[in-house]
């Protein structure tokens, strides 16, 4: 809209808000990567992935401040893993994977020993599909 003197200007200046949330720590302007919440009843500080939206009683922290976070004496810090971060496989993970592969190979070994498609020796077993078995009711 224009007046005789030129384009009209808004009486209230526009505050453009950055879409990037910043660290809540004083004088830190780095982008936030984690959200800190206190559970006072349990004396616990919970540090997790950045919350979907900012809440009044939560604190957004940058990577540096989230790594250096300590809790008051007598409090526990619970660090929740970020689902988007790649998890490092541990020795337990590799062992569990090996056991799962061995377990998956067992039904094929039993079927081969039984002569192909022969029914299992278990009299309660009615049918089998993969690793699932259908068992006869003990009443029948």
Image (cartoon, rainbow, N blue to C red):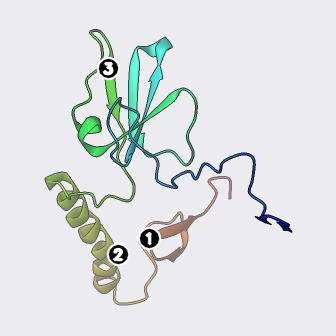
Read off the residue under disc 3.
76
The residue drawn where x is 75% and y is 47% is: 11
Marks 1 and 2 in Cβ contact (< 8 Å): yes
Q: Nearer the viewer, mark 3 or mark 1?
A: 3
Left or right, 119 with reference to 14: left
Q: Label 1 crowding class (10 Å Cα cut-off): few <14, some 14-19, many 20+?
A: few
Read off the residue under disc 2.
107
Q: Label 2 crowding class (10 Å Cα cut-off): few <14, some 14-19, many 20+?
A: some
Outermost bottom residue? 116
- Above-or-below relation of 124 to 106: above
Query: Element under label 3?
Result: strand
Judge by depth and name the residue closer to the eye, 87 or 26.
Answer: 26
The residue drawn where x is 34% and y is 83% is: 114
Q: CA distance from mark 1 to mark 2?
A: 7 Å
Q: Nearer the viewer, mark 3 or mark 2?
A: 3
Q: CA distance from mark 3 to mark 2?
A: 46 Å
The residue drawn where x is 17% and y is 54% is: 90
- Above-or-below relation of 54 to 74: below
Read off the residue under disc 1.
131
For marks 3 and 1, the one nearer the N-term is: 3
For marks 3 and 2, the one nearer the N-term is: 3
Judge by depth and name the residue closer to the eye, 53 or 81.
Answer: 53
Judge by depth and name the residue closer to the eye, 36 or 61.
Answer: 61
Query: Element under label 2?
Result: helix
Judge by depth and name the residue closer to the eye, 52 or 7.
Answer: 7
For marks 1 and 2, the one nearer the N-term is: 2
Q: Position of residue 80 (x, y in %)?
A: 37, 40
Query: Element under label 1?
Result: loop
Quarter of the figure with residue 78: top left
């Amino acid at each position: 809209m224009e007046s005789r003197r030129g384009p009209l200007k808004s009486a209230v200046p526009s505050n453009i808000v950055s879409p990037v949330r910043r660290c809540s720590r004083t004088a830190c302007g780095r982008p936030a990567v984690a959200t800190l919440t206190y559970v006072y009843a349990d004396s616990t500080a919970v540090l997790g992935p950045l919350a979907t939206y900012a809440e009044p009683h939560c604190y957004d922290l940058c990577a540096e401040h989230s790594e250096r976070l300590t809790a008051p004496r007598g409090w526990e810090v619970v660090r929740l893993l970020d689902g988007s971060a790649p998890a490092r496989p541990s020795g337990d993970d590799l062992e569990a994977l090996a056991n799962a592969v061995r377990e998956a190979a067992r039904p094929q070994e039993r079927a081969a020993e039984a002569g192909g498609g022969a029914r299992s020796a278990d009299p309660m077993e009615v049918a089998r599909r993969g690793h699932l078995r259908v068992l006869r009711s003990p009443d029948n």
